[in-house]
Image (cartoon, coloured by chain):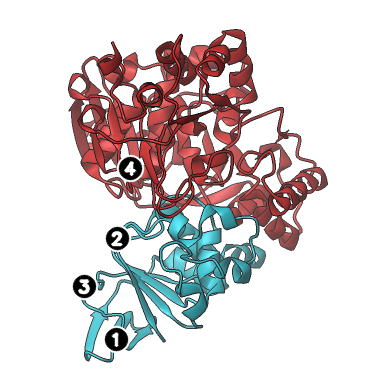
Amino acid sequence: MRVWKFGPDVDTDQIIPAEYLTTGDPKKLATHAFAKMRPEFAEEARSGDVIIAAENFGCGSSREHAPRALIGAGISCVVAKSFARIFFRNSINIGLPLIEADVFDKIEETDKIAIDFGDGVIRDITKDEEYEFKPLPEFMQKLLDSGGLINYIKKQ
Amino acid sequence: MATIAEKILKGEAGEIVEREVDYIMVNDITGVPAFEVLDELAYDIKNEKAVVVQDHYVPNKDVDSAEQAKALRNYARKYKIANYYEIGKGGICHQVMIEAGYVAPGRLIIGADSHTCSYGALGAFSTGVGSTEAAAAMATGRLWFKVPETQKFVIRGEPKRYVMGKDIILHIIGDIGVSGSLYKSQEFYGTAIESLNLSDRITISNMAIEAGAKAGIIPPDEKVFEFLNGRVRGDYKSVYADGKESEYEAVFEYDASEIVPTVAKPFSPANTAPASELDVPIDQAYLGSCTNGRIEDLRVAAAILSGKKISPDVRMIVVPASQAVLAQAIEEGVIQIFLAADAFVSGPTCGACLGGHMGVLAKDERCISTTNRNFIGRMGHKDSEVYLANPAVVAASAITGRITDPTELE
């Protein structure tokens, strides 16, 4: 599992530039993820990788294409100090786990980490440190556990 | 004890509620993924609540966007959506929502576009959502909301000449930052807000999202009621806050007379500076978008450009926000002024605002723009730059070829 670090205020135009919004397919979108900001990402991201960012990750447009592109790239979780609210909703609604935790200055890109959602702990194996995080509100966890909003509605 | 957001969402800040929504808007980018989800749900949708607008990549910029628009058109037929706006009939989605009477005080409206918060200028609670939740709301008529805390913004005093709604909201974002209202609802008060026309108020609500806000609400008054007269669909009931300061998460106060024509420099809407302090040559001037493409915006720019030519080193692109705005601008002679000044004028589209088409930027080019975002590569090449400003600054800058405070031309 590789860690990809991004700073504050990463906007949806960086996650998936608008010129590629002619498909909603996660795999196709993933080939253009971070095309302008970090062109090697699309090529090098692997299933299970984690993004760690500072505040306001996913600001800007409402395009669900942004979390879809990250799912398509294999990202298993985004950890940020805070998230822009539409990105937050979109991610939960389509089943991309998000963690609000202030670990941006603590974890390096080269660190090996493991995330335990049950215990609410991010483990930095390289540095032998642990960081606790608050679980999502019950309703949102239910959405995630259902596999997103649509499966949740189907179940009801 | 409640703010406007709490009253419309019928809940207390922090509570998660499920509510019936009045309208659900999708466009050509966000609509197709939403209908694909609806296909999967196989519901009879609440099609009377759905509004579908072709606006982002129209007229289609390439084969992929043409296929996307065609798919949306077919979905609108399949789901029998009467509120469907083809090019030539509508315009930019938010302008259409307001002009066509979907927006009214007290309503709860969602849209799969982040600038859906624009409708707060008419006293609605409106917010941007993703495609999947737009689909869920079209299927069930309902959606979950976390009731936001509210920040109060009080802007008193008389705005200076050439100071518009754009300058007020850029000034606020410059002060509180791009995450200053994260997860929060904004409410705007004060004599300066009351004095603004509806168009300038829409600019303010439109850019609430650029501070991370969920909504940007202005208590509705006579200007709103007059606008809605003969236009609004159905009944509505205005909602006002109880007015106790203690209900707000924070209160911010500003004196409008101290606000000057303001520019947000790359690459953040919070990176603001007075236009008069910048000496930046430009390659393009863009007048349009859901933020500043209304007739009032075009008039302001035309008054400055009247009888003048733009700089030979600048391309000026004028994009009225809707078919109705374009028609009125033609009737008033405003378009003639732009054409005589050597500006390029198009029909309504989101166009180059999001780097789509109709004026994207090459490497190292700079644009002064009335749009809402100046992120890296927003209007084209990753090494291009966007400076955000009001229509008067954009027009003045088009004439001089560098970022210019319009008072300089007097």
Q: CA distance from mark 1 to mark 2?
A: 20 Å
State yes or no: discs 4 and 3 in contact (Cβ < 8 Å).
Answer: no
Mark number displayed over residue A105 = 3
Residue located beneath label 2 in the image: A8
Tag 4 and tag 2 share a subunit: no
Could you tell me the amino acid type at mark 4? Pro
Q: Colour of chain A?
A: cyan
**Depth order, front residue of B55/B23:** B55
> Which chain letter goes with mark 4?
B
Instruction: Identify the residue at image location x=61%, y=20%.
Output: B326
Front one among A4 and B393: B393
Q: Position of residue B406 (x, y in %)?
A: 31, 19
Does B330 appear above or below A136? Answer: above
Q: Is residue B245 left or right of residue B113?
A: left
Distance between the alpha carbons at the discs numbered 2 and 3: 12 Å
Image coordinates of residue B283 in percent, x first then y, are 42, 36
Q: Is residue B324 left or right of residue A106?
A: right
Residue B269 bears which disc, if any?
Answer: 4
At numbered mark 4, what does the secondary structure look like: helix, strand or loop?
Answer: loop
Side (left or right) of A115 relative to B235: left
Please determine whether, in this image, residue B274 is positioned above or below residue A74: above
Residue B51 visible in the picture: no
Q: Are marks 2 and 3 on the same chain?
A: yes
| Quadrant where the image shows the N terminus of chain B | top left
Q: On what subunit does the disc labeled 3 rest?
A: A
User: Residue A111's mark?
Assistant: 1
Mark 4 or 3, closer to the camera: 4
